[in-house]
Image (spheres, rainbow, N blue to C red):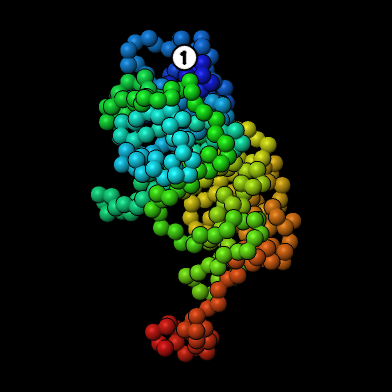
Amino acid sequence: LQLLHHGISVLPIKVDGSKAPDPNLIPNREWTTLQETPLTVEQIKAWPDTLDSFGIASIGGLVSGNLEILDIDSLVLFDPFWVELEKKIPGLITRLPKVKSPRPGIHMYYRLDSTQANCGKLACKPFVNEKGKKKMKTLIETKGDGGYVLSPGSPRICHELNKEYTLLPGPGIDEIPILTAEEHEAILSTARAFDQRPSSRPQQTKLLSYGKAKQRSVSLAGLKPYEQFNLEADWREILAQHGWVLVSIKADGEQYWRRPGKSHGHSALTSAEEPSRLVVFSESAWPFESVTDTRRTYSKFDAFKALNCEGDFGRAMREIARLGYTGSKPSLADRITSRLRKNGQGSDKGSL
């Protein structure tokens, strides 16, 4: 009731260690309805009053006043994060309510005034599991629209480690600050500095800034400019400045997007494999004709061409060239091999 009073939509949680919503305490048994309409005081008072019968989560996003929670997975990361953020905007981190999570980690609460709160993984690190498979561990992420975090007051049995969520000394949940765009970007950029994911693409200028493009090194030979763009461009830089909102990211990297003018739900997804493709769910979300099939799927170049160049291929090619996507010529060995194959004089580079 206190969370609801302070503008946070709440969610009942199972007491089985799964941190999953308890459908028995949710109208229509579907928690996504609470991303749009908070429970009423009467509905919450109707919950069981038995001790430890359910947990409580705070839902992020517009339904909670554009609430976003930064989730730092480990206390080991929290101290260096604090130091780096303090260098950018002194005193910012002391204004944020903080909750110690069971792992232990830290949740920090804030609201946004100019950018929609989103879910996203900001820092990850690779590791090898017990089966010898390469996996990614999330170090820092945000929980906004479409996400939630367990709150203080939840029974310890809500978490698999059988430990509580504890509000730390400092600002309370009734003192969640509203951050400026500059303050929000300082938090995000500080978190991204801890990212350990290997990247196949070098750092690049933002798309559509159309300033002087940075030089790129391309590891694959013989790429056409649009093929390079499809491999290296970032969907966030293609879609976000046209009003598309990144709602959530699955563990496998698949991203779900909401179209401009829509306040809830998903309108499209971008696939996890490379080269990634945009899959649009309805014609109203994407008023452009698909160039591939009737399922409305698009490459990054297709989307860029439609959004920025009115579908003009030549114009789109010139624009991505200005951004540094100029393709790469085949190596001398590749050209010789190709010529030999055409002449029937060898089938691989070893024959040279």
What is the tally of numbered marks visible in this picture? 1
Which quadrant of the view contains residue 97? top left
Considering only vertical position in the picture, is 125 above or below 344?
above
Q: Read off the residue under disc 1.
A: 1
Q: Nearer the viewer, residue 242 or 251?
A: 242
Question: Is the C terminus in the top left, top right, bottom left or bottom right quadrant?
Answer: bottom left
Query: What residue is shown at x 25% (from left), y 49% (from top)?
Result: 130
Q: Secondary structure at mark 1?
A: loop
In the rendered image, residue 211, in percent from the top left (x then y), is placed at: 64, 60
Which quadrant of the view contains residue 116? top right
In the rendered image, residue 2, in percent from the top left (x then y), is placed at: 46, 15
In the rendered image, residue 153, in percent from the top left (x then y), is placed at: 36, 19
In the rendered image, residue 105, in percent from the top left (x then y), is placed at: 34, 35
Residue 149 is left or right of residue 297, and the answer is: left
Query: What residue is shown at x 57% (from left), y 58% (from top)?
Result: 205
Which quadrant of the view contains residue 161? top left
Considering only vertical position in the picture, is 265 above or below 346?
above
> Dot 1: few (<14), some (14–19), or many (≥20) neighbours within 10 Å?
some
Q: Does the image show residue 80?
A: yes
Residue 115 is left or right of residue 219, and the answer is: right
Q: Nearer the viewer, residue 350 or 62?
A: 62
Query: What residue is shown at x 58% (from left), y 62% (from top)?
Result: 229
Q: Does the image show residue 20?
A: no
Label 1 is placed on what type of residue? Leu
Query: What residue is shown at x 31% (from left), y 52% (from top)?
Result: 127
Q: Residue furthest left?
A: 130
